[in-house]
Image (cartoon, rainbow, N blue to C red):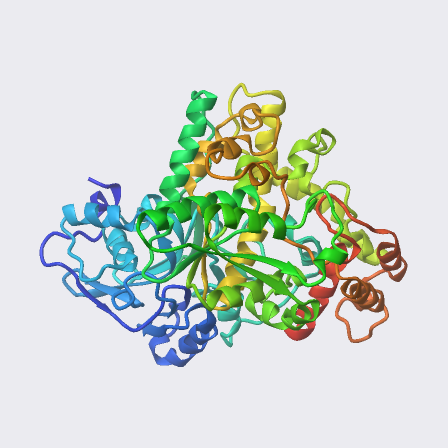
């Protein structure tokens, strides 16, 4: 018998709980718990918090309120369009007390869980994964999270226990923010949901400059807004009358890998086929991102094969670039080639219905405001804005898309994994020798914040969390650390951008390489086997050998396209140079004008930055965020 049931959790014996739902949505949630007041009398506040998330769920919306809790949801209908409405409730116990669920994401093994719960006595009235999740909570309590395979963030208010649970998927694909308050907590899929509550006063402490100027330094759960946190990936936040308490339900575990190379490659291929098959389940059109790189091309190949096998017609695929790339593109370590020729080649080989989205730089500049409002935090400039535009185009023909994020972090694709000078340096490898924007701060601010020490503290903190394998030594041991750093730095930023820019236009992007079963297996493959053919991502390349043309199969890692437009670069430089002397800039008095000029004149491409403008973007985006949201550095 499951532990939660032995402990007296909600049992299905006797009369079954009565299911009901209010019209709502699968992709944006918000809520308020307060034991010191009757939240039911302040329903309008919960409605306002929920309404801020309308873009995430354009199909339906709904709110549930009770004496101490209010939960709201906006829905993008993907599975069981009629039957998956939220908030979804079950009445339990002799007093028919409500258990209320709001949930964002997709549970890919919901059919298997539904069958298991059916054998345990649960009856279902919909085909939705939402009802499966609610029933799973009734059966296993917070332990249900360990059984889920997918991307998800959810909140459950259990009236009988006077307890709220906030739960996030293992890699943090779906966001969930919370702000503890006296007597309760505020929570939402995006900061805007919390910011809409009149009791939350957004503030930015000076210490936050470290992660504002180098966002990848943020530790899991950390945000630049004082009092606002993210639920950490793979964690549960339990809120009751005693306060909020966070604990992990999942961690990576290091074990000996006993499979040989051939078996490992076969296992990786089998897992990818299984994951793609699961993630293509939807009651709406599904497409695929296709850059012409190994990661996305392999996903597109598997998805196209499945579509063809079911007579569904050609898979639609999308790539993105910029008008003028043929003239302006400059190769760098992370972007050695343009995507367009390889995307066309892959699409032709796979027979997909391919769409090339070519964005004009002026169009990208015009999308910066929409990208900022989607993120509620400083954006990545044209990277966010161009992705927002790409997804808006994609949304015209699809509601769901597959994308290749996490393949590089899981299989070892980035150039910093393969440069011994960078690998063995006692700092975050993905920062390399790049200048640190914190060095642009005024001397007194640098002396106060000590950004170099702050970076080392974060490095030491994450290094202490690496799940080590006893007896592992040398390069294999060091690469376990390097891969762990990338899973918590670069990947977190990529997943955050992908979710925000896609959900801002009502598009759900699924990321098969983030499947935790795949990750757990590949995590324990030793590094020397991950590069067994002498190149990056050997296992993935070998698993795709029969699916892709040689030019795509052997193409070097090329990251999401950067904008090389000279006018854009000049505009960024000029705007940054103006910041120190701008009396209206919240950053102005914190910057060293001489240092800023050195950066604009002397910086160039780095291992991760496409050029000076790319490096300087955080200064502009932090300034713009502070101004538009009416914030100052405390």
Q: Look at 10% across and 59% down and name the residue there.
A: 15
For this orientation, the residue located farthest to the left is: 14
Look at the image and tell me whether residue 291 can be seen: no
Quarter where residue 515 is shown: top left
In-front residue for pair 366/525: 366
Which residue appears at 63% of the width and 72% of the height?
A: 369
Q: Quadrant of the N terminus?
A: top left
Q: Is residue 104 left or right of residue 10?
A: right
* Residue 331, x across and y down, in percent: 74, 47
Q: Residue at x 47, y 66 (%)?
A: 395
- Looking at the rendered image, the quarter that the C terminus falls into is bottom right
Q: Taking the image as drawn, is residue 15 in sight?
A: yes
Residue 316 in the image: state x and y as whole percent: 45, 57
Left or right placement of residue 152 versus residue 328 in this view: left
Q: Residue at 63% x, 41% y: name it.
A: 557
Residue 336 placement (x, y as % from top left): 70, 44
Q: Is 555 left, or right, of 573 in this rendering?
A: left
The image shows residue 320 at horizontal and vertical percentages of 59, 58
Where is residue 417, by image quadrant? top right
- Above/below status of 494 relative to 270: below
């Amino acid at each position: 018998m499951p532990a939660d049931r032995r402990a007296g959790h909600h049992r299905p014996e006797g009369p079954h709980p009565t299911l009901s739902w209010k019209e709502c949505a699968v992709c944006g949630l918000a809520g308020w718990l307060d034991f010191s007041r009757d939240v039911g009398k302040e329903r309008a506040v919960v409605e306002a918090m929920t309404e801020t998330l309308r873009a995430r769920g354009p199909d339906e919306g709904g709110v549930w309120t009770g004496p101490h809790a209010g939960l709201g949801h906006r829905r993008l209908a993907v599975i069981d369009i009629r039957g998956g409405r939220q908030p979804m409730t079950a009445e339990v116990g002799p007093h028919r007390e409500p258990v209320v669920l709001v949930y964002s994401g997709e549970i890919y093994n919901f059919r298997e869980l539904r069958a298991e719960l059916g054998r345990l006595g649960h009856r279902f009235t919909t085909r939705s994964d939402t009802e499966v999740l609610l029933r799973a909570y009734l059966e296993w309590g917070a332990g249900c999270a360990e059984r889920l395979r997918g991307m998800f963030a959810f909140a459950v208010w259990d009236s009988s226990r006077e307890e709220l649970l906030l739960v996030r998927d293992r890699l943090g694909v779906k966001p969930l923010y919370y702000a503890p308050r006296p007597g309760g907590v505020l929570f939402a899929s995006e900061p805007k949901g919390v910011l809409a509550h009149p009791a939350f006063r957004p503030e930015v402490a000076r210490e936050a400059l470290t992660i504002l100027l180098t966002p990848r330094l943020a530790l899991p759960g950390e945000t630049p807004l004082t009092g606002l946190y993210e639920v950490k990936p793979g964690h549960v936040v339990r809120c009751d009358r005693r306060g909020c308490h966070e604990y992990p339900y999942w961690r990576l575990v290091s074990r000996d890998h006993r499979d040989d190379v051939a078996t490992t490659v076969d296992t990786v291929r089998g897992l990818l086929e299984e994951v793609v098959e699961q993630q293509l389940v939807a009651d709406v059109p599904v497409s695929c991102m296709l850059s012409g790189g190994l990661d996305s091309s392999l996903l597109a190949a598997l998805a196209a094969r499945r579509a063809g096998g079911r007579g569904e017609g050609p898979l639609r695929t999308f790539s993105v670039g910029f008008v003028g790339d043929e003239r302006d593109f400059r190769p760098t370590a992370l972007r050695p080639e343009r995507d367009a020729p390889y995307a066309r080649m892959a699409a032709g080989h796979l027979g997909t219905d391919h769409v090339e989205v070519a964005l004009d730089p002026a169009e990208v500049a015009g999308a910066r405001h929409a990208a900022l409002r989607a993120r509620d935090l400083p954006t990545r400039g044209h990277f966010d804005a161009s992705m927002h535009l790409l997804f808006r185009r994609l949304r015209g023909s699809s509601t769901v898309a597959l994308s290749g994020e996490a393949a590089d972090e899981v299989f070892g694709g980035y150039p910093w994994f393969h440069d011994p000078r960078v690998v063995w340096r006692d700092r975050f490898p993905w920062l390399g020798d790049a200048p640190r924007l914190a060095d642009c701060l005024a001397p007194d601010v640098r002396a106060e914040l000590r950004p170099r020490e702050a970076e080392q503290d974060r490095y030491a903190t994450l290094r202490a969390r690496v799940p080590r394998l006893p007896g592992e030594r040398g390069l294999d041991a060091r690469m376990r650390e390097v891969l762990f750093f990338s899973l918590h730095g670069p990947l977190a930023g990529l997943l955050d951008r992908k979710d925000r820019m896609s959900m801002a236009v009502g598009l759900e992007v699924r990321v098969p390489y983030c499947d935790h079963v795949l990750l757990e297996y590949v995590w324990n493959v030793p590094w020397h086997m991950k590069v067994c053919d002498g190149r990056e991502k050997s296992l993935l390349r070998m698993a795709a050998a029969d699916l892709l043309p040689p030019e795509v199969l052997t193409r070097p890692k090329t990251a999401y396209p950067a904008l090389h437009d000279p006018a854009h670069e000049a505009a960024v430089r000029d705007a940054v140079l103006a910041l120190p002397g701008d009396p209206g800039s919240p950053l102005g008095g914190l910057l060293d004008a001489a240092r800023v000029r050195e950066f604009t004149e002397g910086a160039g491409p780095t291992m991760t930055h496409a050029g000076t403008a790319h490096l300087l973007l955080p200064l502009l985006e932090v300034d713009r965020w502070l101004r538009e949201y009416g914030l100052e550095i405390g």
